[in-house]
Image: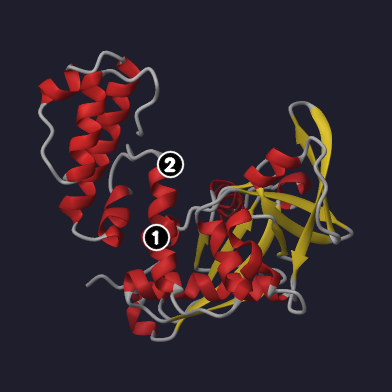
Amino acid sequence: MHPVEESDDAERSLHAALMAEPRRRVARSELEAIADAEARDNYRVVLAFRDRLLAAGTVEACYASTFKGAVDTPPLFIEQMAHVILRNILDGCDDPLKLRAAELFFREQHATIREGHALLADRETVQLHAAGSRYGSIGRLIVEASGAVGSVELDVLDGANAALYWQRESRHDTVISLTYGRPALDALAGVIALWVKHFLGITVRVKPIRRIDEAHWAWHVGLDAESTAILNDLWSGAEVEHGRMQRILALFALEFEDPRAMRADVAGRTVYLALSTNEEGVVRMKPQNLLANLPRNEA
């Protein structure tokens, strides 16, 4: 929203006024005075989000209300809210793997399967460096970039070298493995439990699992659109082709500490979670699904 060289006096004046008083009411005439149509539209979107945030009272309340009905908030703002909320949830956390795993909640990831390991790298970072940049020494991700294959080397965070994260958190240039048994997967499970506790006030235990052994499970939540579709098909008994099944990167079993906090018809049953890639190998986690779709007792 910062004025650019081409910005007119009306746009510069409005920007200065909002910087001085971010909550001030903006008259329609102030917006209409801006000559550039795109700039006007940008201000309308930002001001609508500002008003929604102020009306909600807290970032958490604004985030939760965003998904009640048609979602008209730009994805960027949704991701930024999740980032702010997790900064609060994880305040004082000294586990770099949890902090890196939390990035899945608000930054898209690129998944690569290498020698049986499911590796996740920040998608934006991979796209920026796939044209030929080289750094790091452990992880090597092969990606499709603008129709050509490029490669970028990144460090894979694990228990032994997790401290690397502190030096590079703002660069988003570390990889985590969601392979079963790896510490980053346990870290992600821990962040999921903290997210649920923070929003819903419900204590849950979340643990990674290799597969769902329960033939007729009671409840599931997909952590992304692909997982939701796959789990729905499996639950209904539909045939799921091998290629789609291969997109599942991680499975979790979630249990309520107090079964009375669950819907009566499924009280005490395990809730299964899944995280998957789409056809392009992109992971777009939807943490809001945990808030809307867990079988809570709302009586």
Q: Give x and y (percent) for residue 110.
A: 69, 48
Residue 239, placed above or below residue 201: above
Q: Give x and y (percent) for residue 274.
A: 60, 61
- Name the amino acid, label 2: Pro
SS at mark 2? helix
Residue 84, numbered label: 1
Residue at 78% x, 61% y is 155
Q: Is residue 280 visible?
A: no
| 37 left or right, relative to 154 | left
Labels 2 & 1 near each other (Cβ < 8 A): no
Residue 260, placed above or below residue 132: below
Residue 75, numbered label: 2
Q: Is residue 46 visible?
A: yes
Residue at 78% x, 48% y is 242
- Name the amino acid, label 1: Val
Estimate the spatial distance between the alpha carbons at disc 2 and disc 1, rounded to whole Å: 14 Å
Coloring scheme used: secondary structure
Q: Residue 69, located in which quarter of the rendered image?
A: top left
Given residues 46 and 230, the one toward you in this image is: 46
